[in-house]
């Protein structure tokens, strides 16, 4: 995904969705392995898609309505287990109370009992915690920046063992299928002078000589300063990190429908005011993070600090307290 994000950013086209690239890769593998004749024997699939009366089926794997789907059930359990975090969402209980009901919008949705609303808030809070403590952890963010910097050094170079350059490969699935993590290993062990700069960055990652972490600040204002990325320091990275409950600033529970024990066939929204007065009012937050490719000199620190004060509104929480690299996870 890091490679795909990099290619998307440097190509003169729209953002590349990994789902679409996966479809193209799958089509290539079917063709390359001679599977199409075997699939054609079964004829065309007779179904053209489910009607609106079966709309709830599209809420099982990838739920675009409220984000509650088995994909998240899976990675919540997996990631919390491996990170040693408590998973407060009980998917077994959700499945126990899940029912297909007709909602007030006239469509059928996967709904749950009204008393399970607290379990659903735990669901979205678990997502927030995973992003805050792991997916958007500062060490992960810095390493991702370093990998992208390394890739930028080789974007126009045809690396030995790869048929096309990094930017060209997205248009050729035969070449794209080879863009695995092995690309980084090839660069790391290469003796090619053209890959020297990229190799040095990757060696810094391996030896834990990471970019210097300067700090972060929570942006209280709803509108982030638009010129945040025009920092005059080429050695500095400024990132806005947005963490939310999955539906930007909106409360995702507002998009859900709940039934009660006296009416199992119809479901209605459950306003937050009827649930609890202790629930959050804000469901999205933005952090501005600053890291640097090398240690700053005193004059550079002062200049950057003044720029941050003028453009970020709030002082960075840990900026310049230490010149050491960021610590371990």
Image: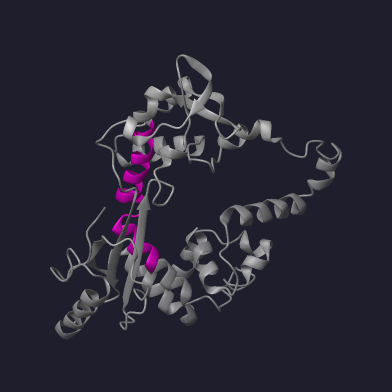
- For residue 129: magenta? yes
Residue in the image at 34% along x and 58% along y: 140
Between 74 and 38, the one nearer to me in the picture: 74
Residue sitting at the far top: 262
Residue 198 lies, in percent from the top left, at 43, 74
Seen from the viewer's position, the closer of residues 51 and 182 is 51
The x and y percentages for residue 150 are 43, 72
Above or below, 60 against 214 in this view is above
Observer-nearest residue: 250 or 170?
250
Towards the viewer: 236 or 204: 236
Q: Is residue 23 above or below residue 116?
A: below
Q: Residue at x 49, y 81 (%)?
A: 194
Q: Examine the image and state in which quarter residue 164 appears.
A: bottom right
Q: Is residue 210 visible?
A: no
Predominant secondary structure in magenta?
Answer: helix
Report if residue 239 lies within the magenta region.
no
Measuring from the top left, give residue 122's x and y in whole percent: 34, 34
Instruction: Tell me the quarter of the picture where residue 51 sits.
Output: top right
Which residues fall within the magenta stretch? 120-145
Residue 2 coordinates in the image, percent (x, y): 47, 61
Horizontally, residue 291 falls left or right of residue 73, namely left
Residue at (68%, 65%) from the top-left corner? 172
């Amino acid at each position: 995904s890091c490679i795909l994000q990099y290619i998307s950013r440097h190509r003169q086209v729209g953002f590349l969705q990994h789902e679409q690239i996966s479809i193209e890769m799958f089509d290539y593998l079917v063709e390359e392995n001679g599977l199409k004749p075997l699939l054609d024997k079964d004829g065309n699939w007779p179904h053209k898609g489910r009607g609106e009366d079966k709309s709830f089926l599209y809420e099982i794997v990838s739920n675009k309505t409220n984000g509650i789907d088995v994909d998240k059930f899976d990675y919540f359990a997996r990631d919390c287990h491996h990170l040693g975090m408590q998973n407060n969402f009980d998917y077994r209980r959700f499945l126990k109370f899940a029912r297909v009901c007709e909602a007030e919008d006239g469509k059928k949705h996967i709904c749950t009992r009204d008393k399970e609303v607290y379990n659903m808030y735990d669901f979205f809070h678990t997502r927030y915690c995973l992003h805050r403590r792991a997916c958007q952890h500062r060490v992960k963010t810095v390493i991702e920046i370093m990998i992208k910097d390394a890739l930028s050094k080789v974007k126009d170079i045809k690396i030995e063992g790869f048929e096309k350059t990094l930017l060209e490969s997205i248009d050729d699935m035969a070449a794209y299928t080879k863009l695995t993590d092995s690309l980084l290993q090839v660069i790391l062990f290469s003796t090619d002078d053209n890959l020297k700069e990229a190799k040095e960055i990757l060696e810094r990652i391996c030896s834990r000589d990471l970019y210097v972490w300067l700090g972060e600040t929570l942006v209280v204002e709803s509108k982030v300063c638009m010129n945040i990325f025009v920092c005059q320091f080429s050695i500095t990275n400024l990132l806005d990190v947005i963490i939310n409950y999955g539906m930007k600033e909106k409360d995702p529970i507002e998009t859900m429908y709940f039934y009660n024990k006296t009416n199992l066939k119809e479901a209605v929204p459950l306003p937050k005011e009827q649930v609890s007065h202790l629930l959050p009012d804000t469901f999205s937050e933005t952090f501005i993070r600053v890291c640097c490719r090398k240690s700053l000199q005193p004059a550079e620190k002062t200049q950057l600090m003044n720029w941050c004060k003028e453009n970020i509104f709030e002082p960075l929480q840990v900026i310049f307290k230490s010149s050491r690299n960021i610590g371990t996870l």
